[in-house]
Every structure is written in C-alpha cells, then in structure tokens.
Image (cartoon, rainbow, N blue to C red):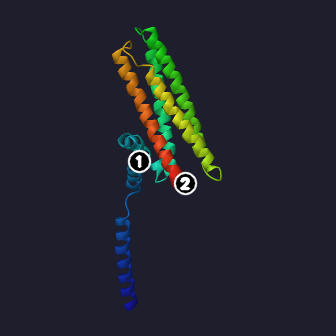
Amino acid sequence: MEGCCNYNFLMTVFLILLGFTTAARPDSGETNTEFIRTSCKSTTYPNLCFSSLTSRSSVIGVSPQLLAHESLSVSIETAQSTSAMMIKVAHSRGMTPREVGAMQDCVEELSDTVSELRKSLGEMKQLRGRDFDMKMSDIQTWVSAALTNEDTCTEGFAGKSMNGKLKTVVRGKIVEVAHMTSNALALINTLDALHG
C-alpha cells in the first residue's frame, strides 16, 4: 500500500510541476512576435517594420537572419506593387510629357531597386561560413544602392510643374518603399553586428 501512495504522490507532484513549466513558457507565436517588436526598435520606422513583418512571425521565429531575409522580401514585394501601380498610372490619359517621363524614369529606378534587393536576398540565403563578411558587405552595398534609386525616383517629381495629386500619390508610394528598404538595411546591419 505504501508504494501505491508514493506513486500517487509522485504523479501529483509531477503533474503540478508540469503545469508550472508549461504555464511559465509563453506561446511560441507570442515569443516570435515579441522578437520582431524588439528587433524593429532598431529601425528608423519601427511601427512599419513591426506591422509589415508580424504576419511572418512563424517563418521568422527568433532568427535575426530570417528577420532580415523577410524584411528584404517585404521590400521587394512593396517595390514590385508600386512599380506595377506606376506603370498603370503612366498609361492613363491627361498626363503631361514631363509627368510620363518622370513615371518611366521612376519605374526604371524601381526595377533597379528590385534587382538589387533580389541579389541581396539571394546572397542572404548563403550567408554563412568564412566569407560571411564579404557577402554581408555586398548585401549592405546593394540595399544602400536600392535606397539611392528610390531617392532618385522621388526627385523626378520635384517642382511645381507636376500634378499635385499625382505627385502626392507617387511620392507616398515611393516613400513607403524607401521606408521598408531602410528598415531592411537596419535589420541587416543588426545581423552584421551580432555576427562580429
């Protein structure tokens, strides 16, 4: 009878302890989300960073490399959708030749941005080993160049001869792409600092 009671007592203690350890451990989705929120604080646009990446928390986990990778992916998607919108707008009626030219230049700059971000994403997938520093330097250079392209695009819409509404819409979309890209670069720089 004594063995039976010891067994019941031990099982009760075990179940109580099991309950404490599982209750003390946060949900992994919550942990991932908090990791993203904390990491985004190092960016210039933390709210945009968090809102653009939180839906990808299960993919990112708590990996700084996956966070930087997904941030690049979001930047690419945003640049592509902005480019598609601008192509559509450029073909609409009522635009001046200067506005059409600025739109075409901007679409070309966005194409270069997407290309540079894709190269960065490809390199990010192979970011390990002895040549980490060289690959990281390439990624930082390409993402910085993508930011320059976005700045060049917005410059084409400066001046009073541009349609105010068109200028506002285009600049707003380009600024969004630039902010996303800036956030990606900040997360890449954080990843670099963690490695060094």
Residue 75 vs residue 48: left or right?
right
Q: Which quarter of the figure has residue 121?
A: top right
Please provide percent x and percent y for residue 2: 37, 91
Q: Which residue is mark 1?
A: 42
Residue at 46% of width from left, 54% of height from top?
62
Question: At x 38% / y 63%, what residue is drawn?
Answer: 25
103 w.r.t. 33: above or below: above
Q: Residue furthest bottom?
A: 2
* Residue 96 appears in the figure: yes
Q: In this view of the protein, can residue 126 be seen by the observer?
A: no
State the residue at coordinates (48%, 41%): 185
Q: CA distance from mark 2 to mark 1?
A: 16 Å
The quadrant of the rendering that contains the N terminus is: bottom left
Q: Mark 1: which secondary structure?
A: loop
Q: Position of residue 190 (x, y in %)?
A: 48, 49
Residue 195 shows which numbered tag? Answer: 2
In the image, what residue type sits under mark 1?
Ser
Q: Badge 1 local density, few (<14 within 10 Å), some, or many (20+)?
A: some
The reply, left or right, for residue 120 in relation to residue 95 is right
Helix, strand or loop at mark 2: helix
Q: Nearer the viewer, residue 126 or 5?
A: 126
5 above or below 143? below
Q: Nearer the viewer, residue 106 or 159?
A: 159
